[in-house]
Amino acid sequence: MAYQTGDTILDDHYNDFATSVNAVWGDGSSDSGYGNSTTVSAVDTNTTVQASQWTTLIARITSSASHQGSSITAITNPSAGDQIEAFSALSTNIATITTNRLNVHARQSAVSVNRDQTATFTGTLTFEDKWVWGSANAARFFFNLGGRLSVSGSLSGHTSDTKADNWASLLTAAGTYQVTAQASGKSGGSGSADTNNTNLGYYDMGTSYTIGFKQFEDTSPYTASFVQWEWKTASSGAEVHAKCTWNDAAADNTGFNKSIYNVQDQVDGTQRMVFAYEKHNTTHIADNGGSITQTSVTLSHA
């Protein structure tokens, strides 16, 4: 029997709605589930659904929609003694929060760590970092609630010459590469990336590195130099790793002291990668992802 005005409203109708809402609001599975413990309880067979139970169901839908920034049709909470009738917008509202479950209306300010290298740079620089959650579910909840990871690079305090200035420009042009649950991509910057994978979200990563982003210098004679960001997860699902490579393919391996000889093919200054995360705004849903630890895996110069 359908859930509609004029038909008998069954406990099965309510329980079906509760199951669908809990898949988003509760632990869920894979890319569905915010990790809330205040799920909607099922009612026993042949039991009358109380007004307070409908109110709880509506509240979970409303909070989910507000968290997402989804537009739904408002439903007035019933009161004990009201005439029993179907809520015409209920099914559509549940479908909306299910479809938009990975959306987020706002995020908190980024929490970032700087990884710096100050030795004269020729050849290849590798910065590898990881974000670690308390469990695979905690990582799921972080991403399902709209959490985002990002990396960006910069060069500052360098001796101004053509090579170093071009490296600083390349890193600015590369912008920020961001990763969410099921999406990724370059934000800001300029120029054209040779690789800008927009489908390398948390749920798309494997346990081996995949290139998410790569951009070459566009000024001759340094067009062989590039930056490259790679991503993977740990088999546990509770870690995400990013490996960021600066490849100075046009580098001169001379050992001359740049401060004396002004060697054009060496780069000094502070070479920095910023690894960051942003959690969802907790106005409507608590921080169910828990704490995140950021750790440097490798910072090497070859």
Image: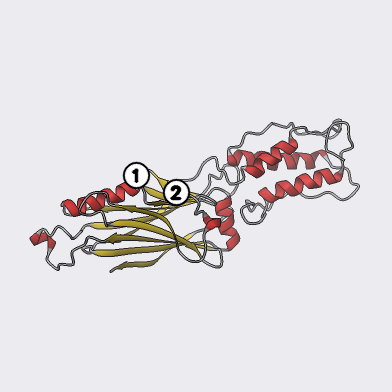
Q: Quadrant of the C terminus?
A: bottom left
Instruction: Determine which of the numbered discs, if any, sits on residue 24 in the image.
Output: none
Q: Quadrant of the N terminus?
A: top right
Is 223 drawn above or below residue 5 in the view shown? Answer: below
Q: Which residue is mark 2?
A: 185
Question: How far from the left and from the top, in percent, is residue 99?
Answer: 64, 43
Q: Is residue 90 left or right of residue 141?
A: right
Number of numbered discs: 2
Is 115 drawn above or below residue 87 in the view shown? Answer: below
Question: How far from the left and from the top, in percent, is residue 143?
Answer: 55, 52
Instruction: Determine which of the numbered discs, if any, sits on residue 189 in the image.
Output: 1
In the image, what residue occupies the spot 12% across and 65% down? 257
Instruction: Kindly identify the amino acid type of the residue bearing the numbered disc 2.
Output: Gly
In the image, what residue occupies the spot 71% across and 46% down? 21
Instruction: Kindly identify the amino acid type of the residue bearing the numbered disc 1.
Output: Gly
Question: How far from the left and from the top, in percent, is residue 266?
Answer: 18, 60
Question: How far from the left and from the top, in percent, is residue 92?
Answer: 71, 36
Q: Is residue 85 visible?
A: yes
* Mark 1–mark 2 distance (CA, rounded to whole Å): 12 Å
Q: Residue furthest right?
A: 46
Quick one: label 1, few (<14), some, or many (20+) residues within 10 Å? Answer: some
